[in-house]
């Protein structure tokens, strides 16, 4: 079983694109499938009001966004993706 990590990255042509990358859930047991321990250096919590829209920007470092409630859409030049509760977008 795999967890599908949705990656937003900069391709060789300089454009932002989406890529799906599987992370194996090969540890634990059938009731609690786990990945290997992943490195982390910190976390930050955020709440945005309904209708919030940010300006186009690049993040200064890679980050994960875990959607706990509501919905978030990330738009690229040619493709947008909606994230809903339970989704993770790095």
Image (cartoon, helix red, strand yellow):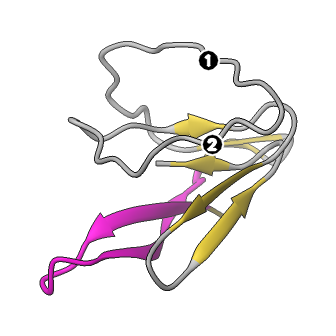
Marker disc for residue 76 = none
Residue 56, position as x, y percentages in the image:
40, 52
Q: Residue at x 79, y 43 (%)?
A: 86
**Real-space Cα separation, disc 1 to disc 2, in angstroms:** 14 Å
Instruction: Give the SS element for disc 2.
Output: loop
Residue at 45% x, 40% y: name it: 36
Mark identifier at residue 46: 1
Earlier in the chain: of badge 1 and badge 2, it is 1
Q: Of residues 72 and 86, which is closer to you in this image?
A: 72
Please, is residue 88 above or below residue 60 in the view? below
Q: Is residue 12 visible?
A: yes
Drawn side of residue 29 relative to residue 2, left or right: right
Q: Which mark is residue 53?
A: 2
Residue at 61% over, 72% down: 80
Q: Quadrant of the N terminus?
A: bottom right
Q: Nearer the viewer, mark 1 or mark 2?
A: 2
The magenta region covers: 4-26
Q: Is residue 64 left or right of residue 86?
A: left
SS for callout 1: loop
**Residue situated in front as seen by the camera: 9 or 30:** 9
Q: Is residue 1 visible?
A: no
At a point 60% along the width and 53% down the height, the residue shown is 25
Q: Position of residue 38 (x, y in %)?
A: 39, 34
Residue 19 painted magenta: yes
x and y percentages locating residue 49 in the rendered image: 78, 24
Dominant secondary structure, magenta: strand
Specify few, some or many for label 1: CA neighbours under 10 Å numbering under 14, 14-19, or 20 or more: few
């Amino acid at each position: 079983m795999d967890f599908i990590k949705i990656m937003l990255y900069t391709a060789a042509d300089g454009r932002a694109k989406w890529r799906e990358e599987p992370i194996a859930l090969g540890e634990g047991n059938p009731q609690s499938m786990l990945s290997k321990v992943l490195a982390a250096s910190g976390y930050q919590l955020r709440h945005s009001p309904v209708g919030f829209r940010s300006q186009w920007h690049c993040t200064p470092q890679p980050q994960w966004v875990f959607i706990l409630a509501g919905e978030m859409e990330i738009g690229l030049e040619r493709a947008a993706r909606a994230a809903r509760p339970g989704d993770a977008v790095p």
